[in-house]
Amino acid sequence: MIFTETPLSGAFVLDPERLADERGFFARIYDPRELAGRGLNPDVEQSSLSFNPKKGTLRGMHFQTPPFAEAKLVRCTRGAVYDVIIDLRRDSTTHLRHVGVVLDAENRRLLYVPEGFAHGYLTLSDDAEVTYQISARYSPEHACGVRWNDPAFGIRWPGEVVLINDRDRSYPDYRP
């Protein structure tokens, strides 16, 4: 796996290192020793799948509070998404900054999202499918979010939001 650190402290884009031959290629997309060796959380408590039939669907910006804060390893296995993370860690030098990355079935990239980050995405294609490996179990009592278009973050989404649920639309403005 090829690790590229993003401008946000502790967040990485991972590209599979392909071993190719006449059959195609083989590549690792998860290795707990490599993650731990870089100081990243390798724990996987659950794996989840999100299917989005409509281009322009926005999901986010979600996070869980301690003790259920989550690290995530996110990959788009079908279609394409613009995946965004926001550093909400108050003691971080990159607090309130965000990064957006295109994840799609073609580039096979993964995004490592540390604990203390909000995460969400906008689908860039119909029938987009996203998989998650998550370090903590889902806890509805600890599930939170920040608004996708909050001016505190200044996210420039690369397309029109045509579908968003009421919960994601109505998160309040971020208050540090």
Image (cartoon, rainbow, N blue to C red):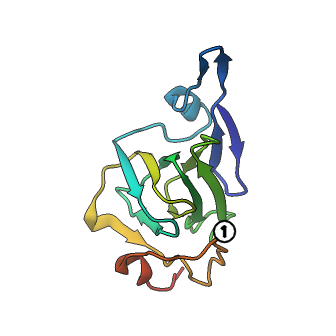
* In this view, 128 is above or below 171: above
Work out whether 12 lies above or below 162. above
x and y percentages locating residue 134 in the rendered image: 41, 46
| Mark 1 crowd level (few <14, some 14–19, many ≥20, 10 Å Cα) | some
Q: Nearer the viewer, residue 166 or 34?
A: 166
Q: Which residue is mark 1?
A: 97
SS at mark 1 in the image = loop
Q: Residue at x 64, y 47 (%)?
A: 12
Q: Is residue 98 left or right of residue 77?
A: right
Q: Is residue 146 left or right of residue 144?
A: right
Q: Residue furthest top?
A: 22
How many discs appear?
1
The type of residue carrying mark 1 is Arg
How far across and how far down the image is residue 150, in percent? 56, 82
Which residue corresponds to the image point at 60% horizontal and 40% vertical from the top-left?
Answer: 108
Residue shown at 55%/41% (left/top)?
Answer: 40
Q: Measured along the vertical axis of the image, is residue 26 above or below residue 106?
A: above
Residue 64 image offset from top left, x and y in percent:
39, 62
With respect to residue 36, does 173 lie above or below? below
Task: Name which residue lies at 53% across and 51% down.
Answer: 79
Residue 145, image x, y percentages: 43, 72
Quadrant location of the C terminus in the rendered image: bottom right
